[in-house]
Amino acid sequence: MKALRLMNWKSEPELVEVPKPTPGPGQVVIKIAGAGACHSDLHLMHDFEAGVVPWNPPFTLGHENAGWVDSIGAGVTTVKDGDAVAVYGPWGCGTCSRCRLGIETLCENPMAAPIPGGGGGLGLDGGMAEYMLVPFERFLVPLPANLDPIMAAPLTDAGLTPYHAVRRSWSKMTPDATVVVIGVGGLGHMAVQFIKATTAATIIAVDMKNEALELAKKVGADHAIVSDDKAAATIRELTGGRGADVVLDFVGAEPTMKMALAAARTLGDVTLIGIAGGSVPFSFFSQGYEVSLQTIYWGSKPELIELLDMAGRGLVHAEYTKYTLDNAPQAYLDLQAGKVKGRAVIVP
Ligand code: NAD
Ligand code: ZN
Ligand code: ZN
């Protein structure tokens, strides 16, 4: 079968022939319906080098995956051939206290995981291929009957990560609150919808691209403003001088982090999701009193189950553009050039 593989650090991925995987005991092979192209893959291809993570290329890309069960190994009882499933992407040890809660992102015994700190598309073979090996059946979540399996793919990361971020600050998203979403791409356009579907807060979206601001409005943002050095002041104006109760930064560059701190209301949350690598000084007076700063890494399996349910009921959806496997390299070029609206999804 064909697969899009990262062969070396600091290189572009290549389409190559690899054998179709077969499931061992407890394992499942899925036929891929869709595999989302995440901006993190661009960081992986261009910024990572040996020693940054405890694994190395070659491996097949694609860490947001969904499809149908193709074959099961001995002892698998929770899925059967043909079932529509999403793959929970962060793969931990399965037995530490975090993993038992379904928070495999924060596994405390990563040396016992299929690969330490990684998963399919992150050190092990991912979903940018016709078939993908899932090493434990617990990583599969059944899809609601009404949910398009292609759309389910981006929901496992472009959906799950912002849902986790939104959920973490729910208590501050009161009906009179304002939430700012910086960067309305694959993740950000889902964040707007989760805020809209689960709270009555006012949403201000910030991006550099007109198409992204239009998308933000379409999926529920109350205001959409251009990302520049006046954006924090505009957010203050729109909130009667108070500032935003929650700021979600899906870029993570120095200017967006500065904007986030400058726009946050006292007692607010500033959450860093984007991994552009920016940093800002943090001191007693660098932001309003009692502002919390936090990072977010992906999300938990219970959260994935919740958001797939919401998507199955039509409360949220992923905007996506399909690319064939042969055209997968183009998907990353388009993502790099900022030409993708919503998510690029590889459909083999
Ligand atoms: P994307 O390329 O689809 O979207 C990024 C958006 O940000 C685009 O709309 C772009 O126009 C906008 N943007 C860029 N610079 C901006 C600026 N200065 N001000 C305002 N908007 C700006 O990317 P994505 O796949 O949605 O990923 C977003 C970020 O989240 C990436 O850094 C990615 O690596 C990271 N990520 C983090 C996690 C996590 O667990 N923390 C998970 C997945 C992705
Ligand atoms: Zn990702
Ligand atoms: Zn664990």
Image: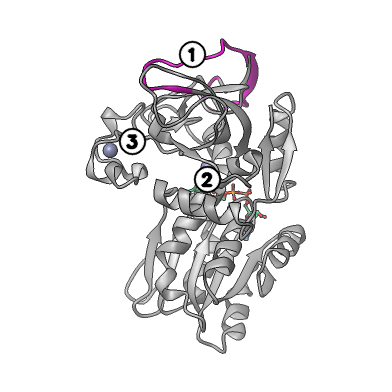
Q: Which residue is drawn at 50% across and 80% down?
A: 177
The furthest residue to the bottom:
240
Q: Is mark 2 on a helix, strand or loop?
A: helix
Find out if the beta carbon at label 3 lies less than 8 Å from the nearest ligand 3 atom. Answer: yes
Q: Is mark 1 on a helix, strand or loop?
A: loop
Mark number displayed over residue 279: none
Task: Tell me which segment is drawn in magenta.
Answer: 7-28
Residue identified by numbered label 1: 22
Q: Residues within 10 Å of mark 3 (few under 14, many from 20)?
A: many
Task: Give the amino acid type for the residue marked by disc 2 in the picture.
Answer: Asp
Residue identified by numbered label 3: 92
Q: Which of 137 and 204 is in front in this view?
A: 137
Task: Give the amino acid type for the residue marked by disc 1 in the picture.
Answer: Thr
Q: Pointer 3 and pointer 1: residues touching (CB < 8 Å)?
A: no
Q: Residue 306 vs residue 96: left or right?
A: right
Q: Where is residue 89 in the image (x, y as percent from the top left)?
A: 46, 37
Q: Where is residue 265 in the image (x, y as percent from the top left)?
A: 45, 80
